Amino acid sequence: MADDNEWMKLPTEDKCSHKLWRARVAGYEEAYKTFQTLEHEKSPEFSRYLGVLKKFVIDNNPVAQEKALDAVLAFVENAAVAGKTTAEIVSGVITKCLNSSRAKTRDKGMEIIMMYIEIEKQETVQDELLKGLENKQPKVVAGCILALRTALREFGSKVLQLKPIVKQMPRMLEDRDKTVREEGKHLVVELYRWIGAALKPQMAHFKPVQVTELEAEFDNLPKEKPIPKRFLRSQQDLKAKYEEQAAAAADAGVEVEVDVPEDVDPYDLMDPVDILSKLPKDFYDQIEAKKWQERKATLEAVKVLTENPKLEAGDYGDLCRALKKVVGKDNNVMLVTLAAKCLADLATGLRKKFSPYAAQCIQTIIEKFKEKKPSVVAALREAADAMVVTISLDAVSEDCVAALENKNPNMKQETALFLTRCFTRCTTTTLPKKLLKMFCAPLCKTINDTVPDVREASYQALGTAMKVVGEKPILPFLADVEPIKANKIKDCCENAELVNKKGVAARPAKPKEVVAPPAERPKTAPAKSSVPEDKRPKTAPAGKVMGVKKAKPGAKSAAGKKSSSTAPAGGITENALADEVVDAKALQLIPEDTLKQLASANWKERLAAMETITQLIKDLPKPDIPTQVVVRTINKKPGLKDTNFQVLKLRLELLTHLAENAVFSLCTASYCLADTVDKTGDVKNGGAAKAALTAIAEATSLDYVCQQGINHAFEQKNPKNQSEMLLWLAQGLREFGLKISVKHVIECLKKALGATNPAIRTAAVSVMGVLYMYVGPKLRDFFDGEKPALLQQIDAEFEKVKGEKPPAPIRGLTRKEEGAGEEEEEAESETINIADLIPRNDISDQIKPELENQLNDKNWKMRNEGLQKVINILNEAKFITPNIGALPEAIKARLGDSNKILLNTALTICQTLAGAMGPGTKNHVRIIGPGIIACCGDLKPQVRAGAVAALNAWVEQCGLAPFVEGELFSDALKLENPNLRAELLGWLAEKLPQCKKLPSELNQCIPHLFSCLEDRNADVRKKAQEALVPFMIHTGYDQMLRVAGKLKPASKDQVKGLLEKARGNLPEKPGRPVSAPAAKAPEAAKEEKTAPKAVSAKPRLGTAKNAKTAPSKKDKNKEDDGSLDAILKANNAKEQRIKDERTLKALKWNFGAPRQEYVDQLKTQMEANCSKHLMDQLFHSDFKQHIKAIETLTKGTPSLKEATIASLDVLLKWFTLRFFDTNTSVLLKSLEYLQTMFVMLNDEDYHMLDFEVSAFLPYLILKVGDPKDNVRRDVRNIFKLMCKVYPASKMFSYIIDGLKSKNSKQRTECLEELGSLIEVYGINVCQPSPAQALKIIAQQIGDRDKSVRSAALNAVVSAYMILGETVYKYIGNLNDKDQSMLEERIKRSMKNKKPPSTEVSPEERPKTAPQIRPAPAASSESTISAPGTITKKPKIMVDRREPVAKPDLISIDVDDILNDEVEVPKSRLRTATGYAELANTGDASAAINAVLSQIASSDIMTSVQALTQIDEFLKMDSSSDLLEPQMDQLLLVASLQLRLIYTKHMGDDNNPSKEEVIKLYRCLLGILLAVFQTESLAKVVTRDVLKDLVSSLVTALLDQRLEKLEEGVQLTRSINVMVVKILEKTDHTVALSALIKLLHEAVGRDTGTSKYMELIMKCSWKMVRMLPNIINEVDVDIILGDVHQFMKEYPLNTWKERPCGDMPLRTMKTVVHTLVKLKENTILNHLTLIDDQNSEIVLYLQKVLNTRIGNPGLGSSRGEQRNGLADSGNTLKQEPGTKAGKLKTSRSTNEMLAEIFKKIGSKDNTKEGLNDLYHFKQKYPEADLEPFLRKSSQFFQDYIKRGLKAIELEKRPGQDEEAPEGPAEVDTSMYTERLRMIREKAWGTTGSTSSLGSTSSSGNTPLAEKEQGPDGDVEGTADKYMDRLKVLREKGGLAEDVENKDPDDNRLAGEFPSEAVNPSGQETRTAAANVADLKKRLERIKKAAHVGDA
């Protein structure tokens, strides 16, 4: 027996696990008692049972199990660690208790489950219960269902997750077990009780019988909304609230109205369906099928998919576009209806996820409202209504306004009805004044429409809007509406029914009689009354009982929120009455005898009078008490200065009564406040005086009484009064809360602390103690300058209240309490940001470059000295602004200092900085933060301690959020520094639990945290484990588990185990901040707060509210109205500012971030244009003042147009500063104003100056990359508006610079904008040239950002639509990937391009330019195609308000032009009338821009007229000055027109006529000739522009179609002359550089023809011939740089394989050789642009120079040496290849020949050399010349042979007549050679009668026969050779040809380089290019010879 009782000696834990059931029962009972008696929930005793509790609930003995369940329930209820056991205990209860046959066991198990839910483990409990539904035992399943139903009934639908339960319903209802089915049915009914109709969609799959049964059960449910019966631990305050409401309702004897959960949205319970993957594979093809039946079948298939009520998120863009296209374009109404329904279903199924597509779809639907079919319109309405709820009304406002202005009545009617339906869902917030104004204007027009239905719809829309915003806000917009129509609008307003967000009509509140519960109040309670609730403003929030709102502890009042230095907004104001009026009213109220007694000298009479007056006043109702009259009456002498304490007491008590029970205004208070303050120090009546002050403070505001009373007390210098007032203030703060101006009180306290009277100082310290509870430790910083003894006293006072919470206010503004239903305030004490009250100093001026250099000095002593200076600066300034210049970077560098002493000093400075800067430290976290954190890993403990201290200081000021957002912690944890990891993790483990919600970037630390768990360092592992719970608080267990799932298998299990262990240690409410409000107020205070709710609302609205708001609003309006006209001034200061900036007297507005010097300069500049009031607002530190300033400017814009224009530059500069602010409100306001301003500028026809744009546009472009969509949208709108007041081509230059940004959004937007500009304004908008611009754009195709790539491709495609294949030339070489993408995009764009005849739907983009539709040129006012007389403003000025016409003038899209059937009316060209007037206008530059844009027009006559205008303009004296800045643009459009002629006009045989083409050619060439004859204009042309022009002219010369024109030959000659003029007149450096670049491109271009290349080379040779005369004007550096690029691109070793031959390379070497000849050795000084000194050109230069040094007699030719032409060496040996008949020459003859060939190679002695050679051959006919000629090229050999033959002909002219006797013997070559030589002598050219542009008779080559010799001067006169040519032509029968030619035609001589400078001995490949032509000519000469013989 003893053994059986041995267990009784065991401890409780052992008893609980004993094998005897009795022992276990005893153990369970002891454990139950222990759990119940433990005082603290975190007692260690609880933790001892964590491992054994699961065994409690699964005990096999029923009796023991019941006792065990009691113990477990007690444990769960009392233990803080109970949450750790949730899963295992609930699982045990489910398996062992819910299926028990004992009812007690089941009930106790159920209670345990409910208790776990109460301790906020509902998610775990629900998971276990749902797992239990899969149990095989029906009893367990039924028990789980019962538990779920019980939990739902007890805790409500907000605690449990309903969606998982709803999914299990079908399974429950179809279970085999009847009990399970019944329980399932009860659960469904309970669900319906909570969520109502939201459950029914989930019953669609139930059996019909089940649905019928359930609906019957639903009908039996009570109608009232269910409320929870139990609450979570965190909801205990809600439980108390419900209990109070219920108690209040029970006392009043009425029904209670409590907060109920919102209806559950059925959408939330549904599973989303992915329909994109289920779309038919051929959907996008079938939707465009030609047969409507196929399209219908496809749409029906989609309709089935879209009917799913909830859709999976995805990319629905393509689907929406396809459906939208059907709605907008399809003519079949059935398909339109079907597509509209599909769109409606998509919007309904996606909800907010449909927002990206909604605006575009609604736009299409609104346009389709013109449809008349009712079925179609109904579907469109449904779709529009479903879509508009996914976006804001603002997004479709412009489309709606445009539709209301449409001519179609159906569209107007349906749009107005659509707006009506939208307004019903709006509130005053979602329908702001801006939108209201936008809609009211068109609606006010449509109410006057001729169609009745349109009028009615407009009335409804306006009436509904009036219902939403109220009558007063909308009336200003209805000022012009007739009274009858206004009444109709009001009728519609009354009948309008608003709906909530879910589309359910808002039910009006049922009027109830509200009876305030009887309760005692303090003396300040006003009289009680009751009014019907329906007279109150219906704004009472949830939580009210019978309309009575319970005041919450710590609630803020408006007065406390907006306290000021004088009368706060909270007080009631009234006008002061005249003394006579006061006396008269006093006689009406008080008997005359009593008034006389009141002024009696006998105190007893005064006492009797006061008693009488008091009784009279108390008998009057509140509204009838004339407070001011009574107060001023009793205050008459002696008033409150009465010497009798009894009379004085009655006076003060009457004041108190009036303040508590009458309307007590600020005016009334002012008459008695001072005297009352004087009596606070009275021995007998001081208490009554304080009570009166308290009552007055409650009637007006504590702030008002505090400021006025304390000021008066300290003015009187009565120490007793001063100390008493301070004590009264301390008590007032406790009763009212912190509803005072803290700054003012602190100033008064400083005065008080300096008083000599100790009582005053003591009272001030008491006030400081109360303030400390609200403000915190920062309060002491304001008093650091006080004496040490006083500081000790202050610290002692602070120590007393340290840790105390501020008491809940029990008093407040009475009127505010009555109006609590109107303005609900947060139920917590107002938090004062003490940092805002501290005056701060700007130390940025003291952080000078010298100090920065010192901080970065190599000498540690200098660095230390710099740090000490920083410390001194901070100590002197004490509190500083965040603007500290470059100090953060300098400190950051010192945080990595190798000197530990300096490192510690830097950390100390960081700590000081945090305290001095306050919250502003967050601005510098990204710079200094990483350095501080890095110091945590230092080896020295003292450094790590200093780093932690600095880190704590920074986090105290700015919190952890900036560190987390900057990813500083994750970056630090990446480093494998054990000290850093351990220190940082330990610090984070301490700080993270104290923080509120942190940014999501904290998740990035998790992988590094897990790696620390496996670190080799034990300390790191330990700290990482400690940090798991703090991290889990913010990131959540699930997130950490997901990250752990990505670890390696070896690490995953270990980390998951640690996570599971840490999960159990999570606090009850993760991350929940500790609430600051104080303890609950006494019960009396609660009753005091509830009583005023019953007071009538009517007097409150008429008096309190209006009295509060009206004066301030009136004053504000007065201020605005009075200063509106004077805020800006119109003056001429802008001219001076422009001048100052040009002369560098002012800073140029160019910076990366605005420095203070720029702000100061702008402030100085703006003072001349802005009023002082506006200046104060513009440069205020508070962003709210900036918003006010912008609003003021916006209001003044219509009336201050001139002043705005005069101040435009400084205003734009100020707005650029706002672009650098971080406040979104200011930014949006700024952009809104800028749009308004640019609209005004456009209306005023103002054209912005470059000075204004350069200071604004680059910074605006920065904001186009803003992450916020609305900001980017506004910036795009501003771009669009700026194009109307500033040339688009100049805008292009700025925008293309935006592509340099690293911000991908900015690059995307800039590219889209560039593409839009090209599309709208044509290719000539590209600056500096289309080639350069498109090359830059094409570079973005390879960007890694998808949106950037797409935008770049679109921009290039826009150019392709204009230029065609030429665009490939412009963009240059792309890599294969980019090239393929571009080709694919172009292919797709061409495929999707609409024919011009069909109506084109508006595109998604351009966002910055309007959609351009082709318009007839004749009807457009802004075109210049119909010239007329010029009025004041020349017609040349395009109306910039209609930008549509501009693109028409310059658009050169070939497809559009070819299909354009609009006829341009033919008219006479403009005369010169008005052009002088144009030159005198200030808008001449803009006018010239407009005309230049028309030169590139695809319409020939438009271009001709524009050219004519420019021609007339050039005839004026001042034209060159005006045209000089536009030269590049003029030549660009001329080049473009030349290309357009070549590509389009010349290829069209039908239209235009060839006469027009000739006329256009003439005009173009005439303008170019006139321009290049003007030296000042010709010299300003840039290289790239000249290159394009020459290329276009040369291409025109190559055009074989010119010969078909009637005047083609003359045109060719004119073009030839034009090229010559260009080369002669332009800047010679530019011309030669352009030619080299053209040749460079021609060689590299596969499509370049050899003829084109030859013409370019001829031009180059022309320039080479000119070099000796122009060498001083040529920039040799640039030329050598261009040749270097040429030779770098095409090295010497690559020319052998080139099909074009090596002539381009030889041409380049000729250029270089000529330069060497002219510059000699000094040419080596001109290699500045060649970075590679080993480049081929440098080596070549050195080689040529060495050759010249070694052979000074040579004509600067290294080719002569190589070819043997200048050989001065020994006699040449006969080569094996020489002919046997030739004799070997001697040494002397060799020397003679060498000398002769020197002369031939010399430019000046060529002819002399040939004559010498001729005579040499005559003297030595057998001499062998082959050795001298063999190494030279065939070209040079032929030249010498021809020269010798020519000399022979001259010597023997008679031989010409001796012809051989047979055709075979005719020597026709002689004729050819002589003809060629004579042409050379006569014209300086070769071969044909024309030069560059001529065409031969036998072939269509425009290239003249090449010159076969070097440069040389022509000897003899041209007449001599012309006569000889004539003789020869006559002999050949060609005399007529000579007569038809014009020998005086100015031609470009085409010179090949002389053989003397030919670097190669190879035969010229191009020398035989015209062999065919020569053969044909030879045949003609032969035939002529035969004819002559005959």
Image: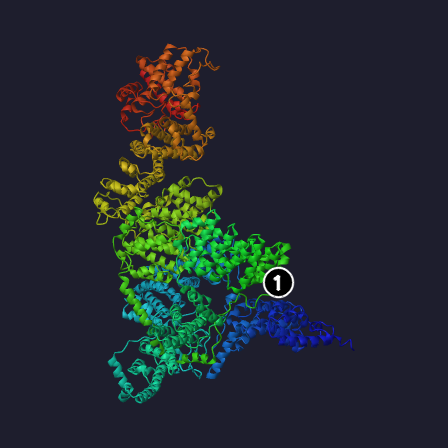
Residue 981 vertical position relative to residue 1939 in the rendered view, above or below: below
Of residue 1195 and residue 895, the one placed in the foreground of this image is 895
Quadrant (top left, top right, bottom left, bottom right) of the C terminus: top left
Asked whether, in this view, residue 722 is left or right of residue 1936, the answer is right
Q: Is residue 243 visible?
A: yes
Asked whether, in this view, residue 503 is left or right of residue 1120, the answer is right
For disc 1, the neighbor class at 10 Å (few under 14, some 14 to 19, many from 20) is few
- On the image, the x and y values in percent for residue 1352 come to 43, 47
Q: Which residue is mark 1?
A: 1060
> SS for tag 1?
helix
Of residue 269 and residue 787, the one placed in the foreground of this image is 787
- On the image, the x and y values in percent for residue 955 come to 49, 60
Asked whether, in this view, residue 53 is left or right of residue 600, the answer is right
Residue 1080 vertical position relative to residue 1748 in the rendered view, above or below: below
Give the total number of marks visible in the rendering.
Answer: 1
Residue 51 vertical position relative to residue 1516 in the rendered view, above or below: below
- On the image, the x and y values in percent for residue 1320 come to 35, 48
Of residue 1917 and residue 1137, the one placed in the foreground of this image is 1137
Task: Quadrant for residue 555, please give it.
Answer: bottom left
